[in-house]
Every structure is written in C-alpha cells, then in structure tokens.
Amino acid sequence: WEWSQTTGWTRRAVAGPGKRDHTDMVYDAERRRVVLFGGQSVPGTLAAGTWTWDGTAWQESPSGSVAGRIHHTMVYDAAGRRTLLFGGITSAGDAGDTWSWNGTAWTPAAPSTIARTHARLGVTANGVILFGGFQTASTTVARLVDGSCTEVPSGIDPGARYLTALVYAPDRQVTGL
C-alpha cells in the first residue's frame, strides 16, 4: 500500500514479501529504495529476507549472516550512507547485534550491546542513537557512529521506555521522543 496526500491509500498489486508482522522498514535515500527486513508471516517462523522497493517492484536480496527476527529496529543513517538494524528476537533468543546494509549486503556494524527488543534507533546531529528496549527497559543511550558503539550516560532522561518513537528535527539539531 502507498499513501499520497492527494489520493489517500492506494493498493499496489505487485509480488513481494507477502504479509508480515513485527517487521521494520526504512527509506534508503542514497539508493532511493525502501528497505524491509525480518518479521513473520506465520507465528514462530522468523523471516530473514531483505526486500527493497523502488516504487515499482519489490526485489529480494540475500541477507547473509543476519538471523531472521522480530521486534528489531532500523534507521537510515544518511551520514554513513547506510541502513542500520539492531536487536530483536531471533530463534536463539533476544539479540544485541547491530548490522549495516549498504544496498547489497549486511555486515556487522558495531560490537554487540545489551540484548533488547522493542528498542529504537534514531538519527541525531552526530550520528545514530539507540534508546530503550523491553528486556532491559533501559534508558541507556548507545551512540553508533562509524561502526563503534559507545555507551553514553543518560543523566536526566525520560525514564525507561519501549515501543517508543524517535524523530530528528534538523532545524533544531535535536532528537525527540
């Protein structure tokens, strides 16, 4: 389905990844494609497929070593010209891994951090941050810049959260939730 301010919702009858829940997708501005990863179409069957949408057709790409998962988070990092994926639930349990998609392949992007689900990646003026999560209900922010993962003291913070949203306001250079 596609949303247009002019026409509203329009169904696009094209072959693709099929129905899935608990997935995530982002817009890759560098490659001008939507990137979708993971989810499940049948409860308990975790998808590892990476799909891209160019506005006309879906294309499946190999996912390499990234395990299928649900309840993960993704963000497009314009500065790094990549899509980042973190955490979620795999068949082995909760994950704390971070992966980078360059339009062709996934590669490990940072050292593993605290395993968590329902966390959120968000863009900042200086890179990408990871906030919150269900298993740890953590308010610790891990800043992901140039493939490194550094724990940043949160100081005064909004408190433990999961299933939240992060948004970057470039005119003010702040990230809010």
Image: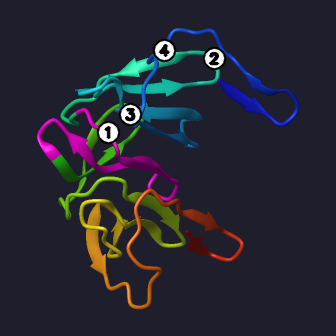
> Which residue is label 1 attached to?
70
For the residue labelled by badge 4, is the local secondary structure a helix, a strand or a loop? loop
- Which residue appears farthest toward the front when viewing the image? 43
Instruction: Indicate which disc, 3 or 1, sits on the residue closer to the N terminus.
Output: 3
Q: Residue at x 60, y 76 (%)?
A: 174
Whole-angstrom CA distance, mark 3 to mark 2, is 18 Å
Q: Is residue 84 magenta?
A: yes
Query: Which image quadrant is residue 90 in?
Result: top left
Q: Which mark is residue 2?
A: none
Callout 2, which amino acid? Thr
Image depth: mark 1 or mark 4 in front: 1
Q: For mark 3, what is the residue?
A: 37
Q: Is residue 104 above or below residue 16?
A: below
> To which residue does mark 2 refer?
56
In the rendered image of this protein, does residue 36 appear above or below residue 56?
below
Mark in front: 3 vs 2: 3
Quadrant into which the C terminus falls? bottom right
Report whether 79 appears left or right of 22: right
Mark 2 is surrounded, within 10 Å at the Cα level, by few (under 14), some (14 to 19) or many (20 or more) other residues, namely: few
Structural crowding at the residue carrying mark 3, measured as other residues with C-alpha within 10 Å and reported as few (<14), some (14–19) or many (≥20)? many
Say above or below: 68 vs 120.
above
| Type of amino acid under label 3 | Phe
Provide residue 82's location: percent of width, then percent of height: 43, 47
Q: Amino acid at mark 4?
A: Gly
Mark 2 near mark 4, Cβ–Cβ under 8 Å? no
The Cα atoms of the two marked residues, 2 and 4, are separated by 11 Å
For label 4, the residue is: 16
Question: Which colouring convention does the figure follow?
Answer: rainbow
Mark 1 and mark 4 lie on one chain; the one further toward the N terminus is 4
Relative to 87, 65 lies left or right:
left
* For residue 108, above or below residue 23: below
